[in-house]
Amino acid sequence: MNEHPASDSVCPPVAGTGDGSVPRAPSDDPGEDEARGEVGVGPWPGPWPEGDHYDTELLAEGDRRNVVDRYRYWRREAIVADLDTRRHPFHVAVENWSHDFNIGSVVRTANAFGCAAVHIVGRRRWNKRGAMVTDRYQHVHHHPDTEALVAWADERGLPLLGVDNLPGAVPLETYPLPREAVLVFGQEGPGLSEEARRVCRDVLSIAQFGSTRSINAGAAAAIAMHSWVRAHVFGQRLPGPVPDTGGAPTPTTAMP
Ligand SMILES: C[S@@+](CC[C@H](N)C(=O)[O-])C[C@H]1O[C@@H](n2cnc3c(N)ncnc32)[C@H](O)[C@@H]1O
């Protein structure tokens, strides 16, 4: 079986727990953390470890950040540098014409899945709620319009692949995702803009079976990025033709 890529974390001695158990990173819910009585790790017990990557303030006062154990007590720059050695070659772009609340969630997921960079297209300011400060460890580029994103991608030979359930979209589930590409997401309401649709090599839809027209962009981005991970980290092969849904509604496509 494949080892999970994130399972190689090296954990420093556990501060504060006293029982040698692995400290748990804070959850997204501060109330839950409070109820558990644990948020990150306390001051490093005993003699400090050596290494430029350690942050003396964190060693002295404890590390309450939302980082995996491998990075406990590391300086932020050292974490970014380490991630840079093993980021995956896919990018994601999100349209930001109306301060979409999903963007923070897309950034967080991009960080979790080792995405090379996130591209914000449109307004420079984006809604960070939902990012849970993961943007500090993630490369985030801004492009004022679709044209600028296309120029950036063209320079690097990266195809743009739209993700939306528009008429003419092809199923993500059976699409051979390239290793190097930019996955482009639209926003709540309008979905992918006309300009974005025009410049994308293909638009990929995620199969739905219920009554809603769409899932939210944050969820769609997570599914699409994980499809890339399954294909290129775990080498999972694509299924054949779309299977019979066994009487369930057939996948739906949103009307324009
Ligand atoms: C809430 S959707 C809105 C657009 C949608 N086409 C509609 O007609 O309602 C916002 C974004 O989420 C992503 N999305 C939502 N559902 C999707 C699906 N089933 N397949 C692919 N992308 C989806 C797309 O990136 C889309 O632009």
Image (spheres, rainbow, N blue to C red):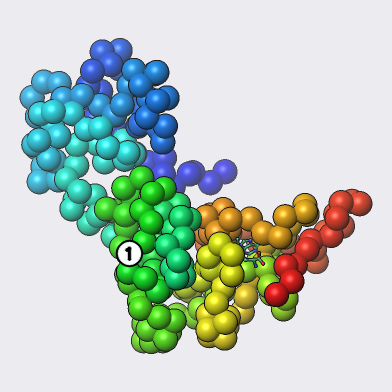
Which residue occupies the extreme top position in the image? Answer: 19
Dividing the picture into quadrants, the one containing residue 56 is: top left
Question: In front: 77, or 2?
Answer: 77
* In the image, farthest residue toward the right: 247
Q: Mark 1 sits on what residue? A: 125
The answer to whether mark 1 is within 8 Å of ligand 1 is: no
Q: Is residue 169 left or right of residue 119?
A: right
| Nearer to me, 214 or 77 | 214
Query: 179 left or right of 27?
Result: right
Secondary structure of the residue carrying numbered label 1: loop
Residue at the location (72% across, 67% down)? 254
Q: Position of residue 15 (x, y in %)?
A: 22, 21
Q: Is residue 93 visible?
A: no
Q: Amino acid at mark 1?
A: Arg
Circle 1: is it few (<14), some (14-19), or many (20+) Cα within 10 Å?
A: few
Query: How far from the left and from the top, in percent, is residue 104?
Result: 41, 54
Quarter holding ligand 1: bottom right
Measured as percent of width and height from the top left, residue 166 is found at: 68, 73
Q: Nearer the viewer, residue 115 or 107?
A: 107
- At horizontal 41% and vertical 40% (from top left) the residue drawn is 7
The answer to whether 180 appears left or right of 50 in the picture is right
Which quarter shows the N terminus?
A: top right
* Left or right of 49 on screen, residue 164: right
* Looking at the image, residue 36 lies above or below residue 192: above
Q: Residue at x 44, y 58 (%)?
A: 103
